[in-house]
Image (spheres, rainbow, N blue to C red):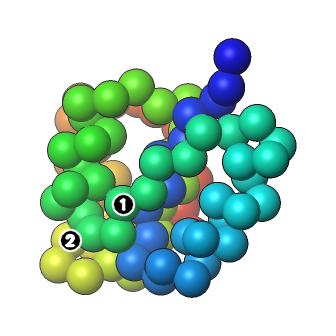
């Protein structure tokens, strides 16, 4: 069974690099580049972990975390 991670970061080069490193290790990575869609995805799907950038456009990482916490206790690693 694969561990599924939601990666939330607006830096597409960084997210591509993280996916490149983690997928061969057996992780399934879902990527979102902005806060609103990330919150929707985080509360509508089940993840083993969320990696969340603090500096996002529109909603910042802290606002995203607060919204996710209203519905989910999934572990979150803040970048």
User: Do residues under tags 2 and 1 come within 8 Å of each other at their CB atoms?
Assistant: no
Q: In the drawing, does residue 23 fall left or right of residue 65? A: right
Residue at (32% x, 40% y) in the render: 42
Depicted 17 relative to depicted 68: above or below: below
- Residue 64, by quadrant, is bottom left
Q: Nearer the viewer, mark 2 or mark 1?
A: 1
Q: Residue at x 47, y 31 (%)?
A: 47
| Residue 45 located left or right of residue 78 | left
Q: Is residue 61 above or below residue 26?
A: below
Q: For this view, does 29 lie left or right of residue 66? A: right
Task: Of the two numbered discs 2 and 1 on the same chain, state the one appearing first in sequence.
Answer: 1
Q: Is residue 53 visible?
A: yes
Q: CA distance from mark 2 to mark 1?
A: 13 Å
Q: Position of residue 4 (x, y in %)?
A: 56, 34
The residue beneath circle 2 is 59
Which residue position holds label 1? 32
Which quadrant of the view contains residue 60?
A: bottom left
The number of numbered discs placed on residues in the rendered structure image is 2
Q: Nearer the viewer, residue 62 or 1?
A: 1
Pinpoint residue 39: horizontal percent, then vertical percent. 24, 49
Marking on residue 67: none
Q: Position of residue 5 (x, y in %)?
A: 55, 42
SS label for mark 2: loop
At a point 36% along the width and 60% down the height, the residue shown is 32
Task: Single out the residue that lies furthest toward the top.
Answer: 1
């Amino acid at each position: 069974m694969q561990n599924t991670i939601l990666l939330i970061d607006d830096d597409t080069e960084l997210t591509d690099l993280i996916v490149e490193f983690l997928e061969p290790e057996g992780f399934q990575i879902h990527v979102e580049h902005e806060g609103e869609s990330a919150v929707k995805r985080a509360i509508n799907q089940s993840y083993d972990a969320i990696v969340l950038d603090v500096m996002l456009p529109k909603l910042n990482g802290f606002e995203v975390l607060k919204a996710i916490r209203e519905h989910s206790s999934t572990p979150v690693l803040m970048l």
